[in-house]
C-alpha cells in the first residue's frame, strides 16, 4: 500500500464520495488545498474537519498532511477573511528578520486554526535573473545572505505556529526563464556555483530545522544530464541528503507539471521519484494521476524495479514523523478559528509590510 507517499489535490469545496473512498482505501498520506476548495470560513472549516476525520477509518489512524502553498503575494490561496499577505520581496526590502518571523507565525496561526499542518513555503530561491517572471517577487531578493537570513526567520515563524514548513525549489529556481508549469527549464550552472550561491538559503533553512524540502523540475545538464532535480538521484541523495546533510522529508514539486509530463509518462515519473527516495509525491490537479501513480508503484515493486522493503521502510518513517509532529490534527472549534481570523493585528502587520512603514511595536518583538 503506497498511498502514504502521495499528497493529492481534491476538486471541490466538499469531499466527493469517490475522493473519500480513494483516500481511505489507499491510505493516502495527505491532501493539498487550493482556492478552488475555499468559499467561506464555515465551509472551509467543515471541509478541513472532514478531511482529517478520514484518518479514523484507516488502519493505524495516522494523521494526514493537510497542506497548502500559501506564500503571500501572487500565491495566496485563501482570501478575506484570511489575512492577505504581501509577497516575500517586501520582507526582503524591509530586511528585518523579526518581521519575517511574525509574517509566517501569524500566517501559520490562521492556517493551523483550520487544521492545516503543512505549508509548502517559503521560497528560498534567489532572484538572480531580472527576466525571471516565474519567481519574481516570490523571492526575498538578489543576495544569497539576505535570502538565507529571512528564510531562516520564516521557517522559525512557522515552527512557532505549529505548522510544518517546506523550503523550495531546491537547488534554486531564481535563474530560470521557462516556467516549469509549462516546460522543462534547462540550466548551465556547475555544481560549485549551486553550492556557493543557489543553495545558500537552503543550507540555512536546514540549520533552522525546517522539516521538508521541495525539489525543482529543473535540468542542470552539467550535474545530471538525464533527469531534472526532482527525479535525480544525484540531487536528492548525493547533494541534498549527503552533501547538505538534510534529514527531513523530501517533497517533489507537482508531478503533473509540464516540465515533467512533456518528457515522461505519469508512470515513469512516479516510479523514478520513488526510486530516488522522495518521501512525498505531490499531485495537485489531475484526479487520475494519483490512481495511475499507485498502480505504477505496485507494478514496479512486482517487477523488482522498486525495492518493496525500502518503500515500506520509508512509509514507516513518514508515519512516525506524523505521529511526532502532528499531535493535534483537527481544526480548533469554528468559533475559536473565527477569532484567529479576526485578529486585527495580523491585518495591521500585513498592511504595514505592504506599505513599507512598520510600527515600532512589531519591530521590538523577539523572534
Image (tube, rainbow, N blue to C red):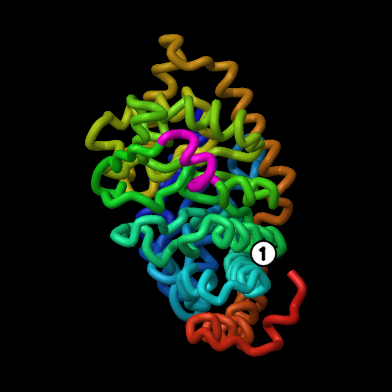
Q: Nearer the viewer, residue 130 or 104?
A: 130
Magenta-drawn segment: 190-199
- Looking at the picture, does residue 162 appear above or below residue 20? below
Q: Main secondary structure of the magenta part?
A: helix
**Quarter of the view holding residue 203:** top right
Q: Position of residue 248 (x, y in %)?
A: 64, 40
* Residue 1 visible in image: no
Q: Position of residue 151 (x, y in %)?
A: 59, 59
| Residue under the image location 48 percent in, 26 percent down | 234
In the picture of the structure, the residue carrying the numbered disc 1 is 157
The reply to whether the magenta stretch includes residue 350 is: no
Quadrant where the C terminus sits is bottom right
Q: Residue at x 64, y 50 (%)?
A: 204
Position of 133 with respect to 118 (left or right) is left
Looking at the image, residue 99 lies above or below residue 141: below
Look at the image and tell me whether residue 90 can be seen.
Answer: yes
Residue positioned most to the right: 366
Q: Position of residue 87 (x, y in %)?
A: 46, 71
Which secondary structure, mark 1?
helix
Question: Is residue 195 covered in magenta?
Answer: yes
Local packing at callout 1 (Cα closer than 10 Å; few below 14, some 14-19, many 20+) is many
Q: Residue at x 47, y 23 (%)?
A: 275
Residue 280 as seen in the image, left or right of residue 61: left
Q: Position of residue 143 (x, y in %)?
A: 51, 60
Q: Nearer the viewer, residue 11 or 112?
A: 112
Indicate left or right for 228 with 301 as reference. Answer: left
Amino acid at each position: 500500500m503506497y498511498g502514504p507517499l502521495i499528497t493529492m489535490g481534491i476538486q471541490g469545496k466538499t469531499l466527493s464520495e469517490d475522493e473519500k473512498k480513494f483516500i481511505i482505501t489507499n491510505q493516502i498520506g495527505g491532501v493539498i488545498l487550493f482556492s478552488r476548495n475555499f468559499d467561506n470560513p464555515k465551509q472551509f472549516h467543515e471541509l478541513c474537519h472532514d478531511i482529517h476525520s478520514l484518518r479514523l477509518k484507516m488502519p493505524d489512524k495516522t494523521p494526514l498532511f493537510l497542506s497548502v502553498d500559501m506564500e503571500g503575494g501572487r500565491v495566496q490561496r485563501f482570501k478575506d477573511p484570511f489575512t492577505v499577505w504581501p509577497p516575500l520581496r517586501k520582507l526582503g526590502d524591509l530586511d528585518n528578520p523579526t518581521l519575517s518571523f511574525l509574517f509566517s507565525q501569524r500566517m501559520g496561526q490562521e492556517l493551523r486554526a483550520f487544521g492545516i499542518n503543512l505549508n509548502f513555503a517559503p521560497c528560498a530561491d534567489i532572484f538572480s535573473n531580472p527576466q525571471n517572471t516565474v519567481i519574481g517577487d516570490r523571492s526575498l531578493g538578489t543576495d544569497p545572505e539576505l535570502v538565507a537570513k529571512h528564510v531562516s526567520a520564516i521557517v522559525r515563524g512557522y515552527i512557532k505556529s505549529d505548522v510544518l514548513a517546506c523550503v523550495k525549489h531546491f537547488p534554486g529556481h531564481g535563474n530560470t526563464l521557462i516556467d516549469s508549469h509549462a516546460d522543462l527549464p534547462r540550466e548551465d550552472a556547475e555544481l560549485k556555483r549551486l553550492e556557493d550561491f543557489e543553495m545558500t538559503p537552503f543550507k540555512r533553512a536546514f540549520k533552522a530545522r525546517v522539516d521538508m524540502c521541495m525539489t525543482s523540475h529543473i535540468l542542470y545538464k552539467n550535474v545530471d544530464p538525464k533527469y531534472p532535480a526532482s527525479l535525480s538521484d544525484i540531487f536528492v541523495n548525493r547533494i541534498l541528503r549527503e552533501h547538505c546533510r538534510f534529514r527531513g522529508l523530501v517533497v517533489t514539486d507537482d508531478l503533473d507539471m509540464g516540465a515533467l509530463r512533456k518528457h515522461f509518462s505519469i508512470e515513469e515519473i512516479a516510479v523514478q521519484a520513488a526510486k530516488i527516495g522522495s518521501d512525498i509525491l505531490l499531485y495537485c490537479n489531475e484526479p487520475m494521476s494519483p490512481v495511475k501513480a499507485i498502480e505504477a508503484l505496485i507494478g514496479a515493486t512486482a517487477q523488482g524495479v522498486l525495492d518493496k522493503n525500502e518503500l515500506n521502510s520509508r512509509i514507516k518513517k513518514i508515519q512516525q514523523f506524523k505521529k511526532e509532529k502532528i499531535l493535534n490534527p483537527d481544526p480548533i472549534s469554528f468559533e475559536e478559528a473565527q477569532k484567529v481570523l479576526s485578529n486585527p493585528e495580523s491585518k495591521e502587520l500585513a498592511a504595514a509590510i505592504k506599505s513599507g512603514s512598520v510600527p515600532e511595536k512589531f519591530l521590538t518583538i523577539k523572534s
